[in-house]
Amino acid sequence: MGSTDTKTAAEPQPAADAHDLAGLEAGLDALETVQTRRATLRETLVQKVFPPFTAVILVLVVWQILVWAKVTDSYKLPAPTAVWDEVEAAWRQGTLLDYIWTSVQRGLFGFAMALVIGTPLGLLVARVRFVRAAIGPILSGLQSLPSVAWVPPAVLWLGLNDSMMYAVILLGAVPSIANGLVAGVDQIPPLFLRAGRTLGASGLRHTWHIVMPAALPGYVAGLKQGWAFSWRSLMAAEIIAQSPDLGIGLGQLLEAGRTNSSMSQVFLAILLILIVGIAIDLLIFSPLERWVLRSRGLLVKS
């Protein structure tokens, strides 16, 4: 009797299992049928253009209200119109784009050099245990060191020239790029590496086809942080190092505004530095991040 009761009680179980299995299959089918599509122009405007545009307008409104309320002297807080007058004056003189290009070309070239140096260095630290133990802590320490600290020794070593600017950029950006790649390699599942070796990938082929693609998320994060360090390092170098041979970049423009006690010029330099940083992120790093996420099926629209 005991065995008969047990069998009878267990009879509905296969039906329940079948029901659960059918539900699981339906859920998997629903995941597989998620369709990706490009956002319409209206969606792009509403989701990506309108919010930052609204934020800028609110900042300008609050700024103008503070000027009207005379919370401080006008020479300390210029009106938005005074800053705009500086923009128009620089544009009429033909110097506005020169300010921007001088700094942008230095920043991009310095970042490219940091990329060439930081990538193999990061792979070496990530893959060779002795190298990681030797210079891994040094890279972390360099990453936390303020970039402005490198300007005085760079000036003494290399003089007031572009080489000094690039040296400061490299010392600020290389540790971030290398550490980002190390973090990406550390997060690769060991199964991926074993599968690559099983399929015959070894040496440079294993690094190029297995390690680098799997480490992309951490690597891209390191690149983004490396650019931020490059840009900040360059601004610090341009503010401190002043020479006619260096031309006038955004950092020199900011320092010139301070020297001339022109807050409208100081605000102009700050806004241009901010705009360039945002533009580089939107034009280079945001699309790169979206491509990495999309290639892993993490960026879909239903």
Image: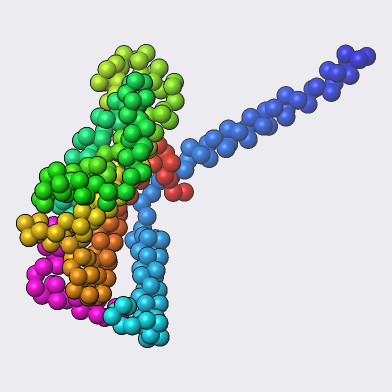
Residue 237 lies, in percent from the top left, at: 20, 53
User: Residue 19 or 233: which is nearer the viewer?
Assistant: 233
219 w.r.t. 132: above or below: below
User: Residue 199 or 59: which is nearer the viewer?
Assistant: 59
Looking at the image, can residue 87 be seen?
no
Residue 190 lies, in percent from the top left, at: 44, 22
- The magenta span reads 79-102
User: Residue shown at 83%/17% (left/top)?
Assistant: 7
User: Residue shown at 63%/35% (left/top)?
Assistant: 23
Is residue 99 rendered magenta in the image? yes
Residue 279 lies, in percent from the top left, at: 27, 57
Q: How many marks?
A: 0
- Report which quarter residue 282 is drawn in: bottom left
User: Residue 161 or 52: which is nearer the viewer?
Assistant: 161
272 w.r.t. 217: above or below: below
133 w.r.t. 93: above or below: above
Looking at the image, can residue 40 be seen?
yes
Is residue 149 rendered magenta in the image? no
